[in-house]
Image (cartoon, rainbow, N blue to C red):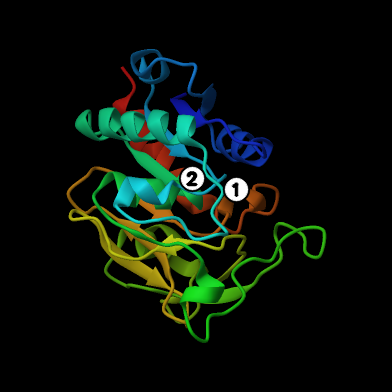
Amino acid sequence: MPVIAVTACRKIEDYRQAILHTGGEVRIVEPASGIDEALAGAGGLLLTGGDDVAPSRYGELPHPSVEEDAARDDFELALIAAARQRDLPVFAICRGIQILNVAGGGTLVQDIPSQITGALNHNLTVPQHQPYDLAHEIWVDKDSLLAKLMGERLIGNDTCEVNSRHHQAVKTVGATFRVTATAPDGVIEAIEDPSSRFCLGVQWHPENFWRTGEFRPLFEGFLEAAAKTTP
C-alpha cells in the first residue's frame, strides 16, 4: 500500500477518500512539515485545491480577485522541486495544476471571467451547485497519459464532462509540460510531463467522484505508479 503525501487544504476529505478507496495510505502534509519529513517513504505526491498562487511567483502583479497563501506557496514549490528531483509520481488537482505549472516556469490566467473573452462558467460553487455537478466538456489529446487512463470513459475517444470550481487556469505552459486537455473556450484543463514516470495535472475535481467512480482511473494510474516507487 503506497503512502501518498497529500497537501493540506480546507476540503481535504474527498481527496483522502479518493486515495483510500484506490488502495493508498494518506499522509497529510503542510507548511509546518519539513520537506524530507513530508516525502520520507512516500510513493507519490498529491497536490490539492485551495487559494490562488501568488502572481509574484511568475512575475506579475495581482489581479484584485487574487487570494494568496504565501506560506503554502513556499512549502509546495519546495515540495514539488524535491518530488520532481526524486521522480516521484505527482498528481495535481485545481490549484495543484496551477502551482505545478508555476514550479515548472509557467504562468497563470489570474481571473478567467475578466481576462478570457467568451469564457464558460468555470466556477460552479456551492451552495448553488453540488461539488460533482458537471459544468462543461473537455477535449482530450488522444496521445496522452490522460486519454490512456480514462480509456472507455471518454466519449468518442476524446471527450468527457467535468465539474469545475476555479477562476484561474494555466496560461503559459512550463517548459517540460504539454497541454493534454482543453475546454471548448480554450481554457487549459490538463497538463502532463511525458519525461516523468507519472506527472499529471487536471483543472477539475476528480476527487469529488470517489463514491461513483467516474474518474477513479486517474487515481488508479497514480497509485499504480506510486506503488512502484515505495520501497
Q: Residue at x 30, y 27 (%)?
A: 229
Residue at (64% x, 72% y) in the render: 135
Q: Is residue 199 visible?
A: no
Regarding mark 2 in the picture, which secondary structure is present there? helix
* Disc 1 to disc 2: CB gap under 8 Å: yes
Q: Quadrant of residue 83?
A: top left
Looking at the image, is 127 positioned above or below residue 180? Answer: above
Q: Where is residue 207 shown, x and y percent of the image?
A: 60, 48
Residue 182 in the image: state x and y as whole percent. 41, 73
* Quarter of the rendering containing residue 91: top left
Q: Is 8 situated above or below 37?
A: below
Check disc 1 and report its element: helix, strand or loop. helix
Q: Residue at x 50, y 78 (%)?
A: 155
Distance from the alpha carbon under mark 1 to that under mark 2: 9 Å
In percent of width and height, residue 210 lies at 64, 47
Name the one closer to the observer, 26 or 185. 185
Q: Amino acid at mark 2?
A: Phe
Label ID, residue 207: 1
